[in-house]
Image (cartoon, grey):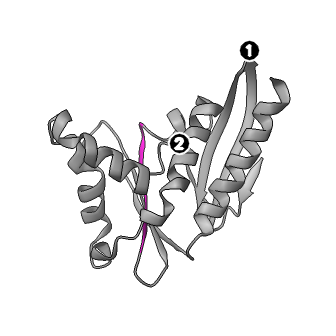
Amino acid sequence: MLFGEKREFAIECEITDYVESFHFCRLRFFVNDEIVGDYDEQVTLGVCLFNAEIFLENSKYRLAPDTEAMTASQILSKFYYSLFNKDFYEVQMEYEDYTHRFQMQEIGGDSTKDNYAILLLRQSDGKERMVIKKITEMENEDVFIREAYFIQGQVDFVVRSFLNWGIQQQSLVQ
């Protein structure tokens, strides 16, 4: 099932298996026609839906006007990499704040969370800026950093459509 437009922003999800009340699926994002996520990786639909719901609940806190002059690398450093350089107790509140407000890779489960940083920030003019980076373990490997801009609510609309569909899918087999 495809939610949104691949040429802008979309989520593609396909149910692959049911084990008791657990639904497994393949999931990936599309941003400006580029694939973000490993569609061969099987993920738990319920976990993806849980993270989508938390992300949507924090939409009103996504405003980050202080980042408008920042480069994509600076944004990644502030809202993604900074969380890995601190003691767990120091970072716990900041992690929950940043993850719930800005980080979309959690929605994709294992398809995205270990291999991508996907951040969505709202600017003061209402536009939303998405910054995506492929995370690799090899220092010399080529990685990409991409940016995309959306009208306010466009990404949330796609995520909500996915969430509503996923909830419906779960209710069909239980």
Q: Point out the tag, 2 or 1, that comes first from the N-terminus.
A: 1
Callouts 2 and 1 close, C-beta under 8 Å: no
Residue 149 drawn at (x, y percent): 50, 74
Q: Percent x, y for residue 64?
A: 35, 70
Check the picture and name the quadrant holding the C terminus: top right
Direction from residue 41 to residue 165 in the image, left or right:
right
Number of marks = 2
User: Residue at position x 66%, y 59% from top?
Assistant: 158
Residue 135 visible somewhere in the drawing: yes
Residue 147, given in percent of the width and then of the height, sits at 44, 67
**Which residue range is magenta in the image?**
114-122
Tell me the kind of residue under disc 2.
Asn
In the image, taking residue 133 as reference, residue 160 lies left or right, namely right
Disc 1 designates what residue? 20
Task: Give the CA separation, mark 2 to mark 1.
Answer: 21 Å
Kindly identify which residue carries mark 2. Answer: 51
Query: Is 138 inside the magenta-drawn segment?
Result: no
Out of 136 and 71, give the one closest to the viewer.
Answer: 71
